[in-house]
Image (cartoon, grey):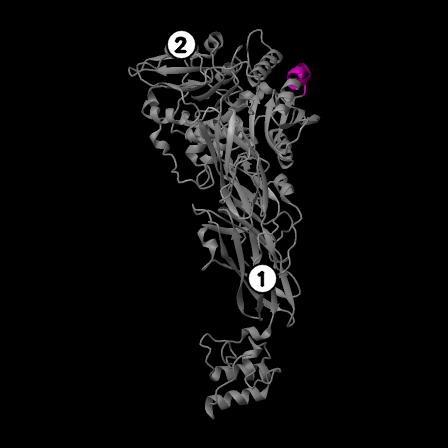
């Protein structure tokens, strides 16, 4: 029996989501055309700005780590302290309040969920109503849900269900479950960090595990790509004087509405303020911000970056501010080359009233939203300005800024841009320890559907993926008066209409670009790499004939149109033939690229198993050919009987291709194994004992005598023993013919049938 590997099973919820019926295909060996291939369910779609680009992983050793520095010596709340403050949440309760779609559906709707605390909703109904109306006007299909109590798992299950109904993003408002994560020995001086982790709600099919059962997750494995984008508006722990949670929300959504109406515009420029420890990276990081803003003010001189100077800049009217500074949840701490320190506190930020809307806080724990008066919230709930802050709930921040500012500058929402950044961070399809230390606390406080002002051109589409032939409708958008549109669909075809439709027949990933000419004579363009994914993937079993007693190889072929970093293949081999599974081979097979091939499940009694292939650092490139060879031996059955080997799944084990940007079920073509007694015979007859030399000798005569007159043990290959070519069961005439060949006439033996 093969070795039984002990591996944790997929989460039950995920299993339920992916179980479905497959369209069964005829048992044919011929290749299928793109028009004929119908694959299974698309399980997950994770688009991103740069997919499989020629990029290098960041060397985190070259970056000075952020430190928790607080002028009053305060420390962050531990999980236990927070839990004692929060108290028992009670059972999870949720209610769908209403659905609201735009009056005109042009096929480009984005499904978005607002999930708000049950007790808070009645206090802010008018603000939420206006927010939903604004979202409808921007082609969002909105669901409003109230919720209270419960655990992070309850909320994640709700989000997962909504994701499989088509939800792309959400906002969590008020007191809702918070997932906590813990990491040991980050940056060599933090023994154990405990922090809220909103990635738990963005990655809905990855596996989060609490290995020590202390209420904090400490492992994140499987498909770690986030599926959805989200924002959070959490007020419960804030202390804003006379401000209440209700007043803060009402004021925030009033700002939000006025910004969408163009009534709260600020100068389209950015402040990039970088303190001493990262001054060497100032030019690079400023260029990254330049992917979104052409006009920027860079402050990075070690003798200039100081609390007073920073506070002055807060009033200079920038739409966007990126600040890089040692901090705590409650303050920034700037230093100079003489190791002197100055601070800007949350209270000072509140009193100053910064003139800015969006913030990227490269500042330790600034977005730790469970802390009273955290800096991220103070920037966000400024009376006159403040719409969204990106930052971390732990020691750490954003790096690889280009993966965030590129989509943001292309007109994507701030929520989508943060999600795309998380995706592009992944190297070898997993987050490294350094990445977990730096980035697992990243969160967005504010409305994730907001975009920066003044983008030049962008486009949307009715869909991004599917099976060939794939029809996609496109629509271009611009804040300029456009006189000419020019599309390139990535497969050689172009169009000149503002909203063309295109059919993709060629499988694979396709870049899409749009160039516009304005009435003022300016050209603007945008390109989305790997924007469209067209599938024609097939997992094909081969028809095989074999005989008893001989180990043979059953080949599984794979055609994949996008790179794959993991494969899951269930195989059922039961039937009238008694097949014995004897392992697998990857010699001359495509699966050799994977470093790990093991069993998620093995059950020899019920004649099925599920293989998992992953690892190796390099994805399986798009291509076609033998994937793996499965070894079997027929131990019983009648000639002509056959077993059909199914790969459409059993129990909770399904065929899954883990690719980028898609996780999906391939089209399937089952194969069969047929018992043919003559298959064991090779070359000439006479190798009665099935020896490796294959040359008849006295041992073959001895074996025939033993079979006929002594032990009667079954022969390994009756076709080899039929040396007189009578076609019947071996008998004394076959012994006579062998003796004649070896010792008398030496006439050549007959060829195998």
Within the image, what quadrant is residue 293 found in? top left
Q: Are marks 2 and 1 in contact (CB under 8 Å)?
A: no
Give the image location of residue 204, x and y in percent: 57, 35
Confirm whether the magenta stretch covers residue 382: no
Residue 653 horizontal side relative to residue 70, left or right? right
Figure quadrant of the N terminus: bottom right
* Residue 574 coordinates in the image, percent (x, y): 64, 60
Residue at label 2? 312
The region drawn magenta spans 118-128
Q: Quadrant of residue 436?
A: top left
Residue on which disc 1 sits: 29
Q: Position of residue 327 (x, y in %)?
A: 42, 18
- Identify the element where label 2 is drawn: helix
Is residue 334 found left or right of 218 in the rendered image? left
Image height check: is 292 above or below 203?
above
User: Residue 120 colored magenta?
Assistant: yes
């Amino acid at each position: 029996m093969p070795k039984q590997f002990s591996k944790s099973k997929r989460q039950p919820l995920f299993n339920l989501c992916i179980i479905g019926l497959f369209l069964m295909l005829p048992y044919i060996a011929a290749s299928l055309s793109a028009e004929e291939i119908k694959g299974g369910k698309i399980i997950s779609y994770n688009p991103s700005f740069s997919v499989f680009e020629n990029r290098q992983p960041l060397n985190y050793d070259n970056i000075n780590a952020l430190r928790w520095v607080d002028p009053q010596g305060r420390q962050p709340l531990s999980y236990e302290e927070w839990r004692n403050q929060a108290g028992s949440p009670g059972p999870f309760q949720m209610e769908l309040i209403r659905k609201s779609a735009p009056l005109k559906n042009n096929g480009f709707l984005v499904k978005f969920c607002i999930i708000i605390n049950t007790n808070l909703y009645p206090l802010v109904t008018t603000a939420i109503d206006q927010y939903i109306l604004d979202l409808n006007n921007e082609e969002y299909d909105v669901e409003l849900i109230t919720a209270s109590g419960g655990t992070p798992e309850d909320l994640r299950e709700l989000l997962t269900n909504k994701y499989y109904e088509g939800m792309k993003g959400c906002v969590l408002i008020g007191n809702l479950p918070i997932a906590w994560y813990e990491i040991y020995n980050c940056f060599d001086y933090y023994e154990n960090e405990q922090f809220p982790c909103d990635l738990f709600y963005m990655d809905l099919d990855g596996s989060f595990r609490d290995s020590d059962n202390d209420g904090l997750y400490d492992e994140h494995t499987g498909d770690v790509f986030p599926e959805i984008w989200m924002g959070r508006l959490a007020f419960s722990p804030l202390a804003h004087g006379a401000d209440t949670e209700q007043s803060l929300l009402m004021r925030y959504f009033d700002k939000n509405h006025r910004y969408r109406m163009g009534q709260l515009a600020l100068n389209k420029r950015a402040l990039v303020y970088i303190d001493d420890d990262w001054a060497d990276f100032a030019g690079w990081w400023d260029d990254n911000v330049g992917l979104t803003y052409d006009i920027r003010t860079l402050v990075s001189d070690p003798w200039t970056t100081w609390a007073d100077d920073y506070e002055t800049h807060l009033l200079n009217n920038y739409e966007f501010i990126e600040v890089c500074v040692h901090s705590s949840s409650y303050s920034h701490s700037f230093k100079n080359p003489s190791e002197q320190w100055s601070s800007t506190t949350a209270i000072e930020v509140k009193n100053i009233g910064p003139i800015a809307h969006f913030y990227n806080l490269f500042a330790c724990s600034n977005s730790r939203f469970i802390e009273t008066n955290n800096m991220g919230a103070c920037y966000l709930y400024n009376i006159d300005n403040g719409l969204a802050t990106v930052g971390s709930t732990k020691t750490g921040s954003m790096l690889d800024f280009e993966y965030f500012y590129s989509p943001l500058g292309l007109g994507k929402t701030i929520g989508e841009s943060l999600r795309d950044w998380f995706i592009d961070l992944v190297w070898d399809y997993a987050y490294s320890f350094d990445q977990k230390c730096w980035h697992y606390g990243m969160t967005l406080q504010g409305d994730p559907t907001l975009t920066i002002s003044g983008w030049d051109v962008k486009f949307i589409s009715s869909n991004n993926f599917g099976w060939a032939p794939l029809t996609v409708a496109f629509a271009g958008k611009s804040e300029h008066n456009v006189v000419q549109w020019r599309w390139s669909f990535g497969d050689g075809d172009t169009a000149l209409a503002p909203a063309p439709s295109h059919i993709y027949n060629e499988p694979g990933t396709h870049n899409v670009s749009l160039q516009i000419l304005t009435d003022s004579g300016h050209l603007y363009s945008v390109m989305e790499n790997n924007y469209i994914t067209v599938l024609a993937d097939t997992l094909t079993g081969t028809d095989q004939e074999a005989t008893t007693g001989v180990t043979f190889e059953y080949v599984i072929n794979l055609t994949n149109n996008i790179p794959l970093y993991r494969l899951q293949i269930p195989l059922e081999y039961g039937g009238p033939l008694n097949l014995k599974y004897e392992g697998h081979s990857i010699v001359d097979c495509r699966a050799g690229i994977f470093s790990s091939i093991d069993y998620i499940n093995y059950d020899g009694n019920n004649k099925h198993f599920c293989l998992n292939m992953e690892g190796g650092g390099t994805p399986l490139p798009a291509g076609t050919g033998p994937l793996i060879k499965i070894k079997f031996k027929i131990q019983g059955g009648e000639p002509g009987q056959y077993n059909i080997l199914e790969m459409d799944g059993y129990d909770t084990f399904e065929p899954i291709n883990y690719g980028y940007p898609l996780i999906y079920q391939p089209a399937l073509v089952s194969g069969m194994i047929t018992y043919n007694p003559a298959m064991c015979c090779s070359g000439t007859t006479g190798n009665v004992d099935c020896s490796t030399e294959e040359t008849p000798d006295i041992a073959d005569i001895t074996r025939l005598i033993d079979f006929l007159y002594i032990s009667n043990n079954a022969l390994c290959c009756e076709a080899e023993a039929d040396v007189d070519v009578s076609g019947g069961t071996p008998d004394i005439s076959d012994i006579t013919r062998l003796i004649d060949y070896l010792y008398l006439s030496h006439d050549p033996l007959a060829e195998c049938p």
